[in-house]
Image (cartoon, rainbow, N blue to C red):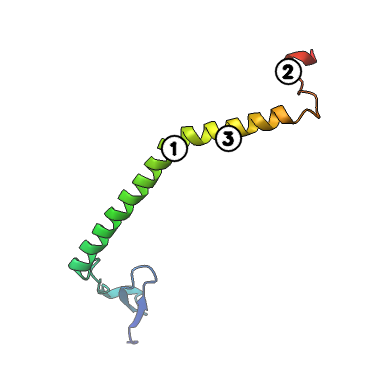
Amino acid sequence: MADVFEIECPCCQSVLQVDPETRVVIRHREAVKTPLIEDLAAAVQDLKGAAEKRAEAFSKSFDAHRNSARVLDRKFEELLRQAKEDKSENPPKRPFDLD
């Protein structure tokens, strides 16, 4: 009888022992799984920090949204002023003028 050989699964790292003559799995040994959260206190601190980051991002976004109308008005006024000062070109043709 030939010796059994071991094969490690590349996906789950479990170990299979296979008999070469019969080509049958003799034994299956699952890999030791590490816990998802090793330190509960550290995980809680990370969640608290994430909540603060979300609140800060929300407040920045809210301020930007609140000031967006004022910014757009200023941009419009500046572009309108530039358009009035620049008399070098004719106004662009309108689509219905092309008919």
Dot 3: what SS?
helix
Residue assigned mark 2: 95
Residue assigned mark 3: 75
Left or right of 76: which side holds 24? left
Which amino acid is tagged 2?
Pro
Q: Position of residue 57 (x, y in %)?
A: 37, 49
Q: Of label 1 and label 2, which has the lower sequence position?
A: 1
38 or 13, nearer to the observer: 38
> Height in image: 92 above or below 55?
above
19 or 47, nearer to the observer: 47
Residue at screen point 76% across, 23% down: 91
Residue at screen point 31% across, 76% down: 15
- Cα–Cα span, label 1 and label 2: 34 Å
Q: Of label 1 and label 3, which has the lower sequence position?
A: 1
Based on the displayed image, in which of its 4 quarters is residue 95 positioned?
A: top right
Q: Position of residue 66 (x, y in %)?
A: 40, 36
Quadrant showing the C terminus: top right
Based on the displayed image, in which of its 4 quarters is residue 20 positioned?
A: bottom left
> Height in image: 91 above or below 22?
above
Number of dots carrying numbers: 3
- Pointers 1 and 2 in contact (C-beta within 8 Å): no
Dot 1: what SS?
helix
Residue 67 is marked as 1
